[in-house]
Image (cartoon, helix red, strand yellow):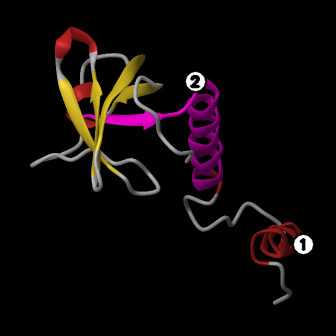
Amino acid sequence: MKKLKLGQTLYSLNVGNAARHRTQELTPVIVTHIGRKYFTCKKAGSSYAKFYFLDDWSEKSEFLATSKLYETPEEWEGDKLKTEIIGKIRKAFEYGGSRFALEQLKKVDSILFGGEI
């Protein structure tokens, strides 16, 4: 993550309970305050949210986070594609991967772990 500036536009994605029964939408937010531990963004409807200055910019909340921040819409697209690919891989190995031949599993092992069994 890059260094933040006041007035910078970031993109907020509703997650968790905020996304329940609603479509996930990427909405622009503006950085309004930058402190030592937190920074604040103005959301739509004049509400504000605090985020930690950690690598993932997690939301400061008493309960579950309701939004996740991205620097660009392309970053969100990449994250979404990554989740889809992981889901496909998980489903392929859901029941132990017994449908794969031993040679195929060795190739997967060498790609993921870089070694031989």
* Horizontal arrangement in the rendering, residue 31 relative to residue 72 (left or right): left
- How many residues crowd around disc 1 within 10 Å: few (fewer than 14), some, or many (20 or more)? few
Vertically, is 20 above or below 64? above
Between 53 and 34, the residue placed more toward the observer is 34
Q: Residue at x 24, y 42 (%)?
A: 65
Residue at x 58% of width, y 24% of height: 73
Does the magenta portion include 71?
yes
Q: Residue 73 got which mark?
A: 2
**Residue sitting at x 63%, y 45%:** 88
Query: What kind of residue is marked 1?
Result: Glu
Image quadrant where residue 28 sits: top left
Magenta-tinted stretch: 66-91
Residue 14 location (% of width, % of height): 33, 27
Q: Position of residue 7 (x, y in %)?
A: 41, 23
Is 71 left or right of 107, judged from the image as shown?
A: left
Query: In the visual, does 55 lie left or right of 45?
Result: right
Q: Is residue 36 above or below residue 25?
A: below
- The secondary structure type at the circle numbered 2 is helix
Query: Residue lying farthest top?
Result: 45
The C terminus sits in image quarter = bottom right
The residue that appears at 40% across and 16% down in the rendered structure is: 27
Q: Earlier in the sequence, mark 2 or mark 1?
A: 2
Q: Identify the disc placed on residue 6.
A: none
Residue 32 point in image, percent of width and height: 30, 27
Q: Is label 1 in a helix, a strand or a loop?
A: helix
Asked if the stretch drawn in magenta spans residue 21, the answer is no
For label 1, the residue is: 103
Is residue 44 visible in the rendered image? The answer is yes
Above-or-below relation of 14 to 65: above
Instruction: Look at the numbered discs 2 and 1 and tell me whether their residues touch, using CB distance below 8 Å.
Output: no
